[in-house]
Amino acid sequence: MNIKLLSIVLSLLFFGCQKPTPPDLNPNAVVPTPKLIQYQQMELIGFIHFTVNTFTNKEWGYGDESPQIFNPTALDAEQWAQTAKAAGMKQLILTAKHHDGFCLWPSQYTEHSVKNSPYKEGKGDVVEEFVAACKKYGLKAGLYLSPWDRNHKDYGNSAYITYYKNQLKEILTQYGEINEIWFDGANGGDGYYGGANEIRKIDRTTYYDWQKIIAFVKKLQPNIKIFSDAGPDVHWIGNEKGFAGSTFWSTINTGQLTIGASKTDYLNTGDPNGNQWIIGQCDVSIRPGWFYHANQDSLVKTPQQLADIYYKSVGRNALLLLNLPPDKRGIIHENDVKSLTGFKAIVDASLATDLAKGQTASANNYRLEHPKFAPQNTLDGDPMTYWSTDDGVFPAKLEIELNKKTHFDRIMIQEPIHLGQRISAFEIDVMENKDWVKIAQGTTIGYKRILRIPEVKTRKIRIRITEANNTVALTNVGLYLSSPKEKLD
Ligand code: FUL
């Protein structure tokens, strides 16, 4: 046989043995768009609550505040952005207008704004400074425009909806790309209302005609993510503590949601039978209040409290939106910066070193026994590769063998959410003296689940998935040993 013939025979043999690459798993009926996946990957974002309340020491301004009181002496939006960036945040959201109606940009539709304040002699534009600072530090920018306006004379009538849309148009066309718009649910009640000083109630289900406003916003900014307690892209988690439910589905049933009137328990868990993918966002302030109050300088959350919130938000398949309210100078207070820096140091020390990296994964079953679905894919850190079983295999068991006995107390698990959220029950065992011992159990996983367990020392750990709405798939598993600083409070 000549060499050419031999090489043909050999290559036929070689390729003949290779299995063709099988298709991906069939996705669930409800999956996130690539844009929503990118949004979820931000994990940690920040809030900037700043307005006349900062100067009146209130949480909710009545709407009768004089613009003259808005006078930050050292406003530095770059300090906000730098602080956020250093903490690992990927986006900041500014209260362009809170319930008091005062606008941080010189809106042409009202006199109730920075243009009538002493700040930069009425020439300032805080929204512009904010967006520029975010851009400079590589952060996405988001804006909060309170639907409720206690200043405006027309609040409660249709003329106010025109005003609100005009303002949306201003903030969504004059400042470049805005990644998120935040629609708060607080709505209606007493207020100044152009001097009427009365109580005004609105019908939350009809007054704003939200579907029209949503379409209007998306037309102005096609890539924007819209937050409210009903989505359509990101929804409130149902409390202001920063905690997602320990069961949390990114799917939810839109038929059960109304902006400003959704059930908080439902928002906190999502719905395995939901008809839409809406990301959960956990908002919480680093201080007791959303706005800066000097008498709360000693009440800033500790790095340990912030770490706990992180595990209950990012660690439960949601985003953490942490509020950092600037003080009367217009900068984030030293105590807040210190706590945030401590928090970042803890999270980094606890979760930076993945002890499972480079170790060996095996499973009781892997789909078609093809490398595309091999257990080892869970240890490569790539969100697109995954381990998956053949259809109907329960429990699906993934085992990680470490090359030596290793201490760990944090377990991170991720599903390939581009295929949907599937898992609803799992258990975790570790090998102790040749026996499997159960050390943890849980329900949902989703984009990311981080479990805190008592420290173990073992060479083998096993994740048993006992329930899922479709064939099991996991994209990444990580093992970590937390920083001792997490425990000091
Ligand atoms: C709430 C508002 O009423 C608070 O003042 C704050 O802005 C918070 C983030 O949302 O509903």
Image (spheres, grey):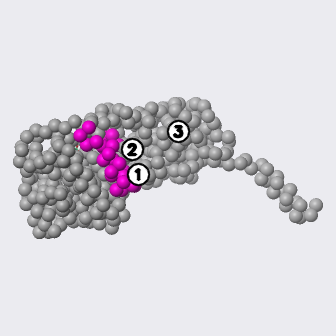
Q: Secondary structure at mark 3?
A: loop
Between the C-alphas of marks 3 and 2, the distance is 16 Å
Whether residue 455 appears in magenta in the rendering, the answer is: no
Residue drawn at 26 percent across, 54 percent down: 168
The residue singled out by tag 3 in the image is: 28
Q: Is residue 62 left or right of residue 372?
A: left
Q: Amino acid at mark 2?
A: Ile
Q: Amino acid at mark 3?
A: Asn
The residue singled out by tag 2 in the image is: 279
Q: Find the magenta span and give its range.
A: 206-231
Q: Is mark 3 within 8 Å of ligand 1?
A: no
- Mark 2 and mark 1 in contact (Cβ < 8 Å)? yes
Residue nearer the viewer, 195 or 141: 195
Q: Position of residue 316 (x, y in %)?
A: 39, 41
Residue nearer the viewer, 158 or 338: 158
- Which quadrant holds the N terminus? bottom right
Q: Compare marks 3 and 1 and give the one earlier in the sequence.
A: 3
Between the C-alphas of marks 3 and 1, the distance is 20 Å
Q: Amino acid at mark 1?
A: Tyr
Q: Secondary structure at mark 1?
A: helix
